[in-house]
Image (cartoon, rainbow, N blue to C red):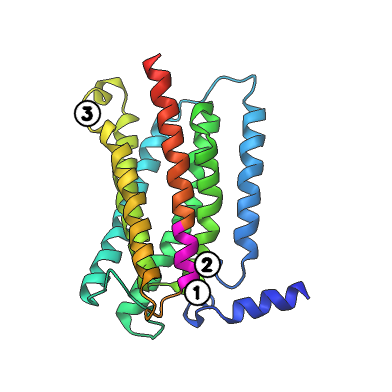
Amino acid sequence: MIQKLHDNLLSLGDPRVKGWLFMDSFVPTAIFCILYLALIFGIKKFMKNRKPYEMKNFLLFYNFCQVVGTFYMFKEFISVAILQRYSLTCQEVDYSENPLAVRMLTATWLFYLSKLVDFVDTIVFALRKKDNQITLLHVFHHFTIFPIAWVCTKYFGGGQSFFGCMVNSLVHTIMYGYYGLSALGPQVQKYLWWKKYITQIQLIQFLSIIVHSLVNMLQLDCKYSKSFSTFYSFYTLVIAGLFIDFYFKAYKKKTK
């Protein structure tokens, strides 16, 4: 019965992603999420009586790759949106084989895969014993956004969902750029005066995505999935709430 339900749900997906990596079944995505949690606890236990790893060279390489990858996705999202004259208030998914529509779908799929790569963030924190950075917000977001991105790619690749992916890709370009420069050491860190603005940029990201989704929900004649817009608005609101809570707790610690 479960297999039949699984097959029925898959049959409702976008036929264009058939054969694409991890898109023919939700099982690989679920397994990766379980492995992610297992790795976090496993590495933290492994590192308990060990010195933290420096990983400077790896961090430079990893963050450079992330900057290139996230900026490429941002470029793809905004380029196709402009070329197809996307609407910010109601953009339906183009399920055709139009080259631009497939290009947008491909960008969404790459966005999904990038969320798997983002698991490395937490693994690095654990190996460097940066336990203060492995917060509920961090783990919850990484654990949930990967399967959400799968659903988005499988059923809503393009259309209204492009906005959240586009904004998130741009914000991550800025964030990984900062992390990469910060990994160069204190001699560079002192010039990263724009660190304080990253928090504000993230809050603007959450607000813009929520507003964008709400606008779509209020347009009753818009054929883009209201259920997905509603879910994503609520999800982003939860993430924003956790982020604000984390921010104020961190601020209070600094002022004590």
Question: Which amino acid, by three-letter code, is at mark 2?
Answer: Val
Residue 144: in magenta span:
no
Residue 178's image quarter? top left
Q: Residue at x 67, y 35 (%)?
A: 42
Q: Which mark is residue 111?
A: none
Q: Residue at x 33, y 37 (%)?
A: 199
Element type at marker 1?
Answer: helix
Which residue occupies the foreground of this view, 178 or 133? 133
Question: Could you tell me how far apart the alpha carbons at marks 2 and 3 are, in whole angstroms?
Answer: 38 Å
Rendering coords of residue 16 (x, y %): 47, 80
Q: Badge 2 is on which residue?
A: 151
Which residue occupies the foreground of this view, 230 or 151? 230
Counting residues from the start of the chain, the first of labels 3 and 1 encountered is 1
Residue 232: in magenta span:
yes
Rendering coords of residue 232 (x, y %): 46, 60
Rendering coords of residue 43 (x, y %): 62, 33
Residue 215's image quarter? bottom left
Question: Which amino acid, by three-letter code, is at mark 3?
Answer: Trp
Q: Badge 3 is on which residue?
A: 193
Q: Are marks 1 and 2 in contact (CB under 8 Å)?
A: yes
Provide the residue span drawn in magenta: 226-233
Q: Residue at x 44, y 51 (%)?
A: 237
Question: Could you tell me how far apart the alpha carbons at marks 3 and 1 are, in whole angstroms?
Answer: 41 Å
Q: Badge 1 is on which residue?
A: 155
Relative horizontal placement of residue 2, taking residue 188 as reference (left or right): right
Element type at marker 2?
Answer: helix
Q: Is residue 69 visible?
A: no
Question: Which amino acid, by three-letter code, is at mark 1?
Answer: Tyr
Rendering coords of residue 164 (x, y %): 36, 59
Q: Is residue 172 above or below residue 129?
A: below
Please identify the quadrant where the N terminus is shown: bottom right
